[in-house]
Image: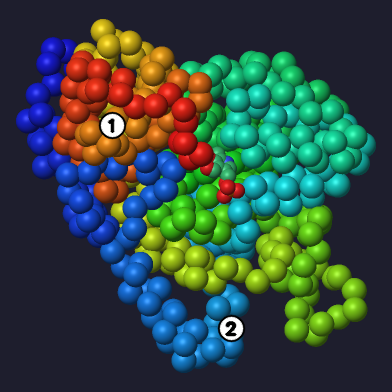
C-alpha cells in the first residue's frame, strides 16, 4: 500500500470480511472501547454466561455429585475437539488440565526422565518467563545444563542460532511457536527436523498461536505441546490449559505428579500408582470444572469461525497496523518491534516507544483503546480476528497518533502497576 490509508478503506475491508458476523457473538458492553488485547485475555463469548448458568444451576445445583458421571469426560472431549479443529492432532492426543506452566513442568519432566543419558536442555533466553523458570528449576533439580539460545528481541529466533546450539547431549528443546513479545512465528517443521537429527524432543508452547495460526502437529512431527485457552480461544480468565503428547510417546512418558486422575481405574482407589496408558495419564487432580466448562462454548465459536479464515484476517489486521504505524508514528518516536512480514508473525504486533508504558495508560484512559505493555518499551497490539474489525484497528491507530502528537501520555505516572 502506498499513500494515505483512508478510514473508508478499512470500512471496505470490513464489508468483505467473511468473519464479520462473529463479532456479534461476543458480549461488547462499550462499543467505543477498542479491545486489542486478545492475545492476553479473549473477550467473553455471548453463549458463555447461559452455558455456565446451566452448568451451575442444573449440573451443580440440581445434579450435585452425580454430575461427575458426565463431567469426568469433559477435559478429554474438549481436548479431542481442540486436537481436530485447532491443532492438527488426533483424538486422544490432547486434553485440558492445570495451567500452561504446570503442563510445561509435567511434560518436560517426563521427557527428561525418558532421556537419562543426556544432560542439556535448550531454552530461548527471550521466551515467556514461566517457560524459562520452569526449565531452570527442572535443570537445577536434575543437575542438567540449561543452554539458552538468544533470539532477536524484535525478530525472534534464527534457526541457525538454534541449530548451532544442538548436539547429542540435548534432551529437550522448549520453544514458543509465536513469541509473546514481538510475535515472531517460528518454523515448527524445521525445528522438529533439526531436533530429530540430534535425537532431542521438542516441547512447543502454542499459547500465542492456538486459534489464530493453523497448526498441524501431526504433519510436522511434533512431539509435545502445551498452551493457554484464555487468549485467542476465549475460554475465560484462568481457563485450564491444554497439553498434547504424540500418540507413540504416550506409553513411554511418565509425568512427575502422580495424581489420581492419571490412575488406571481411578475409583478402585488402588494402593499403588499405575497410570493409564493414554493421554489421561498426564492429568493430576480434579479439574476446575466451571472454568473448564467455559471452554466449551468458546470452542464451538472458534470451530465455526475456522482457523484458516481467522489466520487470513489476522494477517491483514496485522498488516494494517504495520502500514499505519509506518505512515503515522515514526515522527513520534515509534518503531516497529515485530517481524515486518505478516507470514513471519502471529496475530499481534509490537511497537517500541521510549514512553510505551505511559502511552499504554493514556491509550486506555484517554482514548479507550486497550493494548498492553511489555518490558522494556513495547506496546503490544493484539487484535483477535474473530471480533476485531478493520475500522477498530484504523480508529485505534488514529487515536494513538493523536495522543502522542498532543503528548497527553506525559501526565501519567512512570511507575508501573502490578499488572501491565
Ligand atoms: C507464551 C506463554 N506461555 C505461558 C504462559 C503462562 O500461562 P499460565 O500462567 O496459564 O501458566 C503465558 C501467559 O501469558 C504465555 O503467554
Q: Is residue 34 above or below residue 66?
A: above
SS assignment at label 2: helix
Q: Residue at x 46, y 28 (%)?
A: 415
Name which quarter of the figure residue 166 lies in: top right
Q: Position of residue 167 (x, y in %)?
A: 81, 23
Disc number for residue 20? none
Q: Is residue 262 above or below residue 62?
A: above
Disc number for residue 363? 1
Q: Position of residue 326 (x, y in %)?
A: 27, 14
Q: Residues within 10 Å of mark 1 (few under 14, many from 20)?
A: many
Residue lying farthest to the right in this orientation: 117
Total marks shown come to: 2
Asked if residue 174 shows in the view, the reply is: no
In the drawing, does residue 196 fall left or right of residue 10?
right
Is disc 2 in contact with disc 1, using a CB cutoff of under 8 Å?
no
Q: Residue at x 51, y 33 (%)?
A: 180
As rendered, which of 411 and 111 lies closer to the eye? 411
Q: Position of residue 77 (x, y in %)?
A: 53, 69
Question: What residue did someone put label 2 on?
Answer: 68
Q: Residues within 10 Å of mark 2 (few under 14, many from 20)?
A: some
Q: Position of residue 328 (x, y in %)?
A: 21, 15
Residue lying farthest to the top in this orientation: 331
In the drawing, does residue 25 fall left or right of residue 187?
left
Amino acid at each position: 500500500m502506498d499513500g494515505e490509508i483512508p478510514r473508508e478503506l478499512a470500512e471496505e475491508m470490513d464489508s468483505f470480511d467473511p468473519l464479520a458476523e462473529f463479532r456479534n457473538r461476543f458480549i461488547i458492553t462499550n462499543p467505543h472501547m477498542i479491545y486489542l488485547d486478545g492475545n492476553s485475555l479473549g473477550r467473553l463469548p455471548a453463549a458463555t454466561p447461559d452455558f455456565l448458568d446451566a452448568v451451575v444451576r442444573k449440573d451443580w445445583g440440581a445434579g450435585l455429585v452425580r454430575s461427575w458421571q458426565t463431567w469426568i469426560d469433559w477435559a478429554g472431549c474438549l481436548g479431542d475437539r481442540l486436537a481436530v479443529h485447532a491443532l492438527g492432532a488426533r483424538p486422544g492426543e490432547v486434553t485440558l488440565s492445570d495451567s500452561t506452566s504446570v503442563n510445561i513442568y509435567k511434560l518436560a519432566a517426563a521427557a527428561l526422565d525418558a532421556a537419562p543419558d543426556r544432560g542439556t536442555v535448550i531454552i530461548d533466553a527471550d521466551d515467556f518467563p514461566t517457560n524459562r523458570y520452569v526449565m531452570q528449576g527442572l535443570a537445577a533439580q536434575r543437575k542438567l545444563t540449561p543452554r539458552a539460545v538468544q533470539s532477536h528481541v524484535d525478530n525472534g529466533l534464527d534457526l541457525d542460532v538454534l541449530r548451532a546450539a544442538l548436539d547429542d547431549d540435548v534432551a529437550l528443546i522448549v520453544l514458543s511457536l509465536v513469541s509473546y513479545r514481538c510475535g515472531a512465528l517460528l518454523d515448527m517443521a524445521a525445528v522438529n527436523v533439526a531436533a530429530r537429527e540430534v535425537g532431542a524432543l521438542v516441547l512447543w508452547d502454542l499459547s500465542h498461536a492456538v486459534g489464530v495460526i493453523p497448526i498441524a502437529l501431526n504433519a510436522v512431527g511434533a512431539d509435545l505441546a502445551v498452551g493457554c485457552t484464555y487468549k485467542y480461544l476465549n475460554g475465560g480468565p484462568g481457563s485450564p490449559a491444554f497439553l498434547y503428547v504424540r500418540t507413540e510417546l504416550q506409553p513411554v512418558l511418565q509425568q512427575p505428579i502422580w495424581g489420581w486422575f492419571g490412575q488406571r481405574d481411578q475409583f478402585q482407589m488402588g494402593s499403588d500408582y499405575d497410570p493409564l496408558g493414554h493421554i489421561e495419564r498426564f492429568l493430576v487432580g480434579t479439574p476446575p470444572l466451571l472454568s473448564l466448562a467455559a471452554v466449551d462454548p468458546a470452542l464451538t465459536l472458534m470451530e465455526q469461525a475456522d482457523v484458516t479464515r481467522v489466520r487470513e484476517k489476522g494477517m491483514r489486521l496485522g498488516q494494517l497496523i504495520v502500514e499505519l504505524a509506518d505512515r503515522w508514528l515514526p515522527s513520534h518516536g515509534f518503531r516497529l518491534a515485530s517481524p515486518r512480514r505478516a507470514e513471519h508473525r502471529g496475530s499481534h504486533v509490537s511497537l517500541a516507544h521510549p514512553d510505551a508504558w505511559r502511552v499504554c495508560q493514556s491509550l486506555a484512559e484517554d482514548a479507550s483503546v486497550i493494548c498492553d505493555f511489555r518490558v522494556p518499551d513495547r506496546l503490544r497490539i493484539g487484535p483477535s480476528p474473530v471480533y476485531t474489525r478493520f475500522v477498530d484497528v484504523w480508529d485505534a491507530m488514529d487515536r494513538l497518533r493523536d495522543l502522542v502528537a498532543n503528548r497527553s501520555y506525559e501526565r501519567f505516572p512512570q511507575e508501573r502497576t502490578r499488572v501491565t
